[in-house]
Amino acid sequence: MSNLRYKLERLYHAGMAGPAPTLFPDPRTAGIEEFKPAAVLIAVTERAAPGVLMIHRPGTMRAHAGQVALPGGRLDPGETDIDAAVREAQEELGIDPRHVDVIGPLDVFLTGSGYAVTPVLALIPPDLPLVPNPDEVAQWFEAPFGFVMDPANHQRRAIEWEGKTRHLVEIPWNGHRIWGITGAILANLSKRLNWPND
């Protein structure tokens, strides 16, 4: 077991053992009674300074066009959250499931678009030859894991939505605007892991 794997696994089990801290919600879920199951993969690269893989959705997509996202999507019939997250990472970025070392699922995130999203934390080898699916990925990037886990980089943003002020999390990095569902999921992971910024 690598040092990073041991560290992530230890922090994951310690963080998930207790009750949920005050997590960032999606402020648009009021009135939604039924949520469709989905999953995303938080793929941490196993290097001395680990990163996390993220994608930009194509501007032509009907939902979340151009936004930063984690690889993921709906569960297929009979799939577990882990199955779906790993499958979607393969379909969107060409990551071979054999290279995905799953640590575990995280807190379900309910979205205003009607999904119950389970983030799945995993390690992958660094510098895999990724093959983005152009129908689902406009570009991909690897942000420093320590940066996105640092609460000092989690900026609160107020937006107007349906006549009300809503508060979202934004993590700006190197010209990328990591916000909305993805920003909240990563900020919630930060609360669970208490990742050291050393």
Image (cartoon, helix red, strand yellow):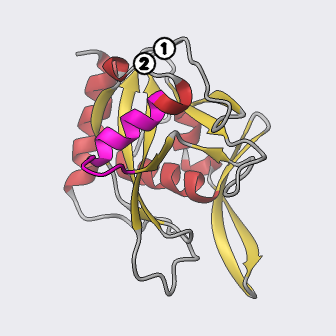
Tell me whether circle 1 and circle 2 mark residues in contact (CB < 8 Å). Answer: yes
Is 87 displayed left or right of 64 in the figure? left
x and y percentages locating residue 89 in the rendered image: 47, 32
Q: Which mark is residue 126?
A: 1
At x 30%, y 52%, the residue is: 77
The quadrant holding residue 40 is top left
The answer to if 84 sits in the magenta stretch is yes
Q: Amino acid at mark 2?
A: Glu
Q: Amino acid at mark 1?
A: Pro
- Depth check: 137 or 187 in front? 137
Q: Secondary structure at mark 2?
A: loop
In the picture of the structure, the residue carrying the numbered disc 2 is 46
Secondary structure mainly formed by the magenta segment:
helix
Q: Circle 1 sits in a helix, a strand or a loop, which is it?
A: loop
> Few, some or many C-alpha atoms within 10 Å of disc 2 (few <14, some 14-19, many ≥20)?
some
Q: What are the residue bounds of the magenta stretch?
A: 75-90
Comparing 172 with 61, the one in front is 61
Q: Residue 66: where, in percent of width, then height?
A: 75, 47
Q: Is residue 133 left or right of residue 145?
A: right
